[in-house]
Image (spheres, helix red, strand yellow):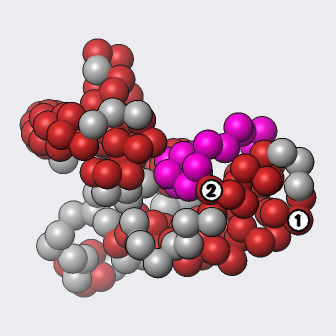
Amino acid sequence: MSSAIPQNVTQILLEWRGGNQEALDRLMPLVYDELRRLAARYMRSERSEHTLQATALVNEAYIRLVDMKVSWQDRAHFFAVAARLMRRLLVDHARAQNRAKREGAGKKVSLDEALEVSSKPALDLVALDEALTRFATFDPRKAEILELHYFGGLNNEEVAEALGISRATVQRDLRISKAWLSSELKRCGQ
């Protein structure tokens, strides 16, 4: 996460939690660029013709964040919640797209167009979400660390802060989690 985000984000979040609606107006300009970077990071792993754009993802996440009744703790907590929300939005979008394809609403392309598709396959967010959900059933903390790191863009120190654990624990668990996820996605054909 960018160090350019002012530390007073935590103070503004606490004011917002306390009922100060003006704090929300001050918060968005401070966090928008970082949310946009997170969204752009997610979208880079998607296929080029993806119908959801980073700006739309940020805007939808913002609308939902504003409506959430959360006891904000600090900026790491805010970005962790935002990351989970963006993950949900992306997975829901991917599922809707898969449903549309199964129902025959998929875009028809010529053979030439199909051959021009990038050799780098897009990350299957539904498969990633299912793998993380399975992982969380037997090791919730490691799954949450992986989610905060991948979807939240939090660095090890920020993950440690958000979860109240040591940085060394985050580093160790992240190594194990990445290895498990890689193995699981390969096993599922990803």
Q: Which mark is residue 73?
A: none
Q: Which residue is under mark 2?
A: 10
Q: Which region of the structure is painted magenta? A: 68-83
| 109, 136: nearer the viewer | 136
Give the image location of residue 63, x and y in percent.
75, 58
| 76, 40: nearer the viewer | 76
Hey, which quadrant is residue 42 in on the image?
Answer: bottom left
Image point 33% across, 33% down: which residue?
165
> Label 1 crowding class (10 Å Cα cut-off): few <14, some 14-19, many 20+?
few
Q: Which residue is under mark 1?
A: 22
Distance, label 2 to label 1, CA atoms, is 15 Å
Residue extending furthest toward the top: 138
Say which element carries label 2: helix
Give the image location of residue 9, x and y in percent.
63, 63
Whether residue 174 is visible, yes or no, is no
Q: Earlier in the sequence, mark 2 or mark 1?
A: 2
| 187, 6: nearer the viewer | 6
Give the image location of residue 105, x and y in percent.
55, 58
Residue type beneath disc 1? Glu
